[in-house]
Amino acid sequence: MGTIVARDDTQGLVGRARNGGKSRTTYDRLVSLDRETNTVYEAKAGAWTAARAGKSLDAAERLMGRLVTGHAPVLDLGCGPGYLTAALRTDTIALDPAVAMLDLLRDRLPASIAVQGEAGALPFATESLGGAVANAVLVHIDRADLPMVLAELHRTLRVDAPVELGMFGGDQDLTTVTTGDFVGRRFSLWDDDHLQDVFVGAGFEVAAHRRIEREETGHWPSLLSSLTRRRSLPDTVGPGMRLLVCGLNPSLHAADMGVGFGRAGNRFWPAALAAGIVSVDRDPRHALREHGVGMTDLVKRSTPRADELDRQEYVDGLARLERLCAWLRPEAVCMVGLSGWRAAVDRKATAGWQDRLLGGSPVYVMPSTSGLNAHAQLPDLTEHLRAAAAGR
């Protein structure tokens, strides 16, 4: 197996930032498993494992059936005592935040590759993994944190890598279980459509999705999703955003680079720096974490040129964007490029604040920052971004 190079730029901390007198959560919070839940697993790992002897291996079998040949290792994300690890390839990396679970895994599978870590700050090189399974583990994170956790998984996977993901159906953010043998764990529940929106925003194609009702046991429905890592750009979004920047769609260069507007000739980042809305060049995670500036795309399909998109893609993308805004409630949305807004909303739209809101958020539309747009100069683009960030 090739060497897995660890990252050193995520710390998994929680901090606070100030913006115009408002305090908001910052995003150096890429820890994923709820701390209260992890405490339960650390204390009761043995009892939890004994209670789940003979756990279904369906997720591992589905992943094995979709893997392509090659030498990139596979990730068992939130491996617990290694039920699925044992059914996967020998080069599978088993990752879990609970040391007690990893101790049980090593007892059962002495030759396993075990790593203590968090899903939101994976210690693996970009595009180093050939697939992943995460069965009923991402249910233990707040729903608003899932986009960034999936963005991190997207970063580590190779293009077209398969993912098998198991979640629970319902409608709740992290809520504590108060009955049973493992009181204190907290779960988030999802409706099918909302969850699939998040997958698409994170740069994954939903190859298959099914819901299994558990009415006879009183348990939540299982939501089983087969995903494929697209050559796309994951959203960097979260709660408390000051500004959500929306491009038309990722270029192939941006998708491969992992940074929106990342090409050297694009003026977005120079304009954003000059406007004072970011402080680090071409670093969307820093922009979100330190300045509350999120980033998404109207259409997630990457293309060499935006003019390869059709109107229906813009319309469908706008519907997803509106749902995203209704969920996370950014203070404002800045659409970079008039063509997408004109195609989906108002063919006569001009730059500036628009009459239509998206999910309750005001929308500012500005010219494209592409170097191909000779009509807009850097000072003009800077002023547009400054106006969008200032709010309506």
Image (cartoon, rainbow, N blue to C red):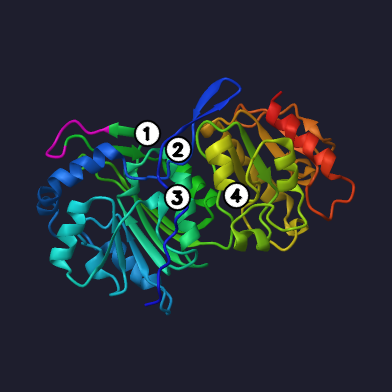
Magenta stretch, main secondary structure class: loop
The part of the image, by quadrant, that contains residue 345 is: top right
The residue tagged 3 is: 10
The answer to whether 92 appears left or right of 272 in the picture is left
Q: Which mark is residue 173?
A: 1
How far across and down, in percent of the image, does residue 208 sit? Answer: 44, 59
**Where's the C terminus, which quadrant?**
top right
Instruction: Say which residue appears at 50% left-offset and 62% top-offset.
Output: 229
The alpha-carbon separation of the residues under discs 3 and 1 comes to: 24 Å
* Residue type (three-letter) at the residue carrying disc 2: Ala
Residue at point 36%, 68% (across, down): 74
Q: CA distance from mark 4 to mark 1?
A: 29 Å
Badge 2 crowding class, 10 Å Cα cut-off, few under 14, some 14 to 19, many 20 or more, is some
Q: Which mark is residue 144?
A: 2
Q: Earlier in the sequence, mark 3 or mark 1?
A: 3
Q: Tell me the magenta residue range.
A: 176-182
Q: Report the side of 330 relative to 96 (left or right).
A: right
Label 4 Cα crowd, 10 Å radius (few <14 / some 14-19 / many 20+): some
Given residues 335 and 345, the one toward you in this image is: 335
User: Mark 4: which amino acid?
Assistant: Asp
What label does residue 23 carry, if any?
A: none
Residue annotated with mark 4:
283
Q: Amino acid type of disc 3?
A: Thr
Q: Earlier in the sequence, mark 2 or mark 3?
A: 3
Q: Are marks 4 and 2 in contact (CB under 8 Å)?
A: no
Point out the tag, 4 or 2, that comes first from the N-terminus: 2
Q: Nearer the viewer, mark 3 or mark 1?
A: 3
Name the residue located 19 percent from the left edge and 54 percent from the top edge.
101
